[in-house]
Amino acid sequence: MIAYLNGNYLPRDKAVISAEDRGFNFADGLYEVIRSYSGRLFKLDAHMKRLRRSIDELRIPFDDIGKVKEIAERLLKENDLSSDDATVYIQITRGHAPRKHGFPPKDVPPTIFAYASAFKPHEQELNEGIKIILKPDIRWTRCDIKSVSLLPNILAFQEAKEKGAVEAVFMRDGAVTEGSHTSVFAVFDNKVFTAPKSHYILPGITRDVVLDLCRKRNIPFEEFPILESRMKKAEEFFITSTITEITPVVQIDEWMVGNGKPGPVTRELQGSVKELIEDFLR
């Protein structure tokens, strides 16, 4: 596998980052994951806009967003993924410098690392739905930044796996925020709900795709918190992300959602996403 590191394309196992890199010592960095369908990067502009925002919020001195697009496209070619489904992972840190809490001098270049890998959708989960667990949201309050500092997410996700679930969903102040790596939606009375954008959630690319599809398909929706007190009354739940697309949720902890099967609103949105991707590839 060919990866990219600081201007060089090289075998991934040869991509070596300094032990003094601030991403390693402080989680002082950010990342982005882009989905590729048949070699074409989906919603690339939206991903680059979010990447730019994360860079600005962390004040990392990196201006050449156009270069990231070039890197992603070349990695697909270098790894013979121009005709396949794939993901491209991009990570940017503040670079390597002596371990001090303050920012290093402005002339320290950021570290840019990226790689592409083949991807196969989780068809069974998409078709049959998944189980999730609920966890208190004790993360920091800047979850809107796609930071590499993900330890609380990792611990919650691992607990989900150990309990036979596919995702952990966070609860804060009596309401759903988001999953460990997904956005979360619920359907009440045929109306779609998801948490409004705030510092507590990542502005998901697929989240925005779903809301745009709701507008176009005249599916009622509202960016309003999914309240814990109402969760068991939901007819449907689903999660979204670049990787999961729209995945139905049929079980939460030990109780079933609706009749325990993916619901009609979820199915309609799944079909709409499929059509959107087909149109994108034409």
Image (cartoon, rainbow, N blue to C red):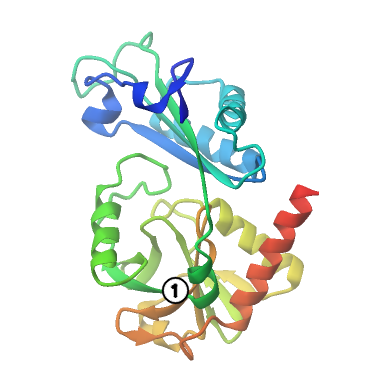
Left or right: 159, with 125 as reference point: left
Q: Residue at x 56, y 20 (%)?
A: 64
Query: Where in the figure is residue 270, as x and y percent of width and height?
Result: 63, 69
Residue 258: x percent and y percent? 48, 89
Instruction: Give percent across and percent down for residue 146.
Output: 42, 42
- Report the residue that reaches farthest toward the right: 282
Q: Which residue is mark 1?
A: 226
Secondary structure of the residue carrying numbered label 1: loop
Q: Residue at x 42, y 55 (%)?
A: 201
Q: Amino acid at mark 1?
A: Ile
At a point 42% along the width and 23% down the height, the residue shown is 11
In the rendered structure, the answer to whether residue 101 lies left or right of residue 53 reads left
Q: Nearer the viewer, residue 234 or 131?
A: 131
The relative height of residue 137 versus residue 66 in the rendered view (above or below) is below
For the image shown, how many numbered marks are present on the structure? Answer: 1
Q: Nearer the viewer, residue 9 or 6?
A: 9
Give the farthest residue toward the top: 107
